[in-house]
Amino acid sequence: MESLSVAQARRIALAAQGFLDKPHAEPTMRTFQRTLERTGVLQVDSVNVLQRAHYMPLYSRMGPYDVDLLRRAAERRPRRIVEYWAHVQAFMPVELWPVMQHRMDDYRAKRGKWGFVQADDELEQSLLAELADRGASTARDLDDGLPRAKDNWGWNWSKTRRVLDYLYTSGQVAIAGRNSQFEIRYDLPERVIPPAVLAQPVPSRADAARELVRRAARSHGVATVQDLRDYYRMEVADTATAVAELVEAGELLPVTVEGWKRPAYLHAEARLPRRVRARALLSPFDPVVWERARTESLFDFHYRIEIYVPAEKRVHGYYVLPFLLGDRVVARVDLKAERKEGRLVVKGAYAEPTAPPETADELSAELRQLAGWLGLDSVTVEPRGDLAPLLRP
C-alpha cells in the first residue's frame, strides 16, 4: 500500500481542484467547463456580503472573469448546469440529472413526512398546472396566481414556497434560473433539462452511487470514505459499497496518509505535482474548505464560519476567507463589499503561524485584484488582526 505525506496529499488535493490549471488571459466558456470539471459542484448560498458563494470558487481558480459565463451556463441553451440538492443547494453538471433520480425518488417517498411541509395534493397539482401554463415563475408569482376558493387552505407565500421546494427536490419541477432579487424561478423539467439528458436511462442505484463517488474522488484526488460521502451528501452504506467496487476496478487505490487515522483512497488518475503555485482567496463555501475536518487534516488550519455567531462572540469576523498561497493556507481575512461607496473593506486580517514573509504583499495584491473584479474602486483596511497593519492596498 502506498504511503503519502501530508504535503503530498495536500498538493494532490489542490491539483484535483484545478489549482494547477494555467489561467486564460480572458476566461471563456471553455475555461468555465474545465473549472467545473474540477470542482464538480458549485454551492449556492444567499449571503451577498462580498459575492455570492457560487461565483467565488470560479474566481479562485480562473481569476477575474465575466460572471455572465455562469448565468449563460445555467440559463441558456445548451444548458450546462442546473441547480439541485447535490451537495447542499448547488449547481451541478446537467448530465447528473438522471444520476440524481434515485435521490429524487427518495424525497418523493418521504412525502407527507417532511417536517416543514405537509402533503397537499390540490396545492401541488395547482402549482404544476400554473407552471405548465405560465412557464418559469417565482414562488411569489405562483402565490399571486393561485385560486383562493378555500380561505383556510393557507396558500400564502411561505406554504407555496415549501411545496415548491418539495416538488423541486423530488424532481417534479426544476430551477430555470433566478431573478435579480435572487428568487428562484421554477419550471417543468422538460423546459429546463435538455431533451437528450431527459432521454437517458436512469442508472441503477448502485451505478448512480458509483458515479457520484467516482466524481467525488476525481475532485478530491485523495480522500477518506467520509470525504467521498460528504461531497455529494450520500448515504454511508452506498458510499462504502461504491468505494469497494471502485477499488476492485482499479479506479481507486488504497493509501495511507501521514497523520490520518482513517484509510484513504487515491484516484488512479490523480496528479502529484512537485509544487503548487496558487494564490487565491477561498470562499467559506469552497470545496477545498467546506469539510472542516478535511481542511484541518490537509492544511493544519482550524476554520469555522461565524456568520451565525453573535458579533461579540466572533473570533475572526462575519465573512472570513482563507488565503491560499502556494500549497498552504497562510492567512484569513474578513471582507465586505461596500458597493455604494465602491470599497472593498478588510474588516480584519490574520496571519497563520506558518505564514511566510511575503504573505502581506501577496494578500495585498490579491485584494486589489478582487476589488477590481467586483467593480470596486479601492481597498480599505481596518486595524483588526496582526496582518492588517502590513497590508498595502
Image: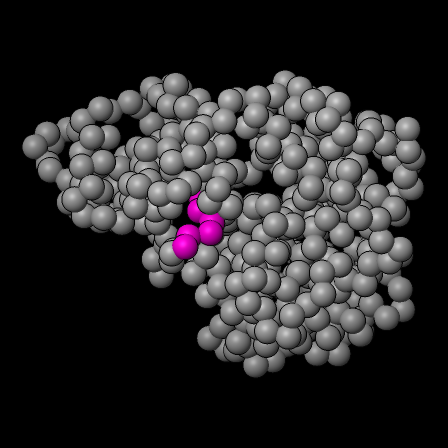
Residue 282 placement (x, y as % from top left): 67, 56
Residue appearing at x 70%, y 37% in the figure = 217
Dividing the picture into quarters, in which one does residue 6 lie?
top right
Closer to us: 355 or 98: 98
Viewer can see residue 230: no
Colour basis: one colour
Residue 149 placement (x, y as % from top left): 7, 32
Residue appearing at x 23%, y 48% in the figure = 135
Residue appearing at x 38%, y 30% in the figure = 170
Q: How many marks?
A: 0
Residue 275 placement (x, y as % from top left): 87, 58
Q: In the figure, is residue 253 to the left or right of 209?
A: right
Residue 159 placement (x, y as % from top left): 28, 35
Residue appearing at x 49%, y 72% in the figure = 339
Q: In the figure, is residue 116 to the left or right of 312?
A: left
Dividing the picture into quarters, in which one does residue 226 lie?
top right
Residue at the outermost left position = 149
Residue at the outermost bottom position = 377
Viewer can see residue 326: yes
Asked if the stretch drawn in magenta spans residue 197, the answer is no
Residue 388's place in the image compared with 77, above or below, is: below
Closer to us: 246 or 56: 246
Quarter of the rendering occupied by the N terminus: top right
- In the image, the segment drawn in magenta is 78-83
Closer to us: 381 or 281: 281
Quarter of the rendering occupied by the C terminus: bottom right
Q: In the figure, is residue 99 to the left or right of 392?
A: left
Residue 251's place in the image compared with 28, above or below, is: above
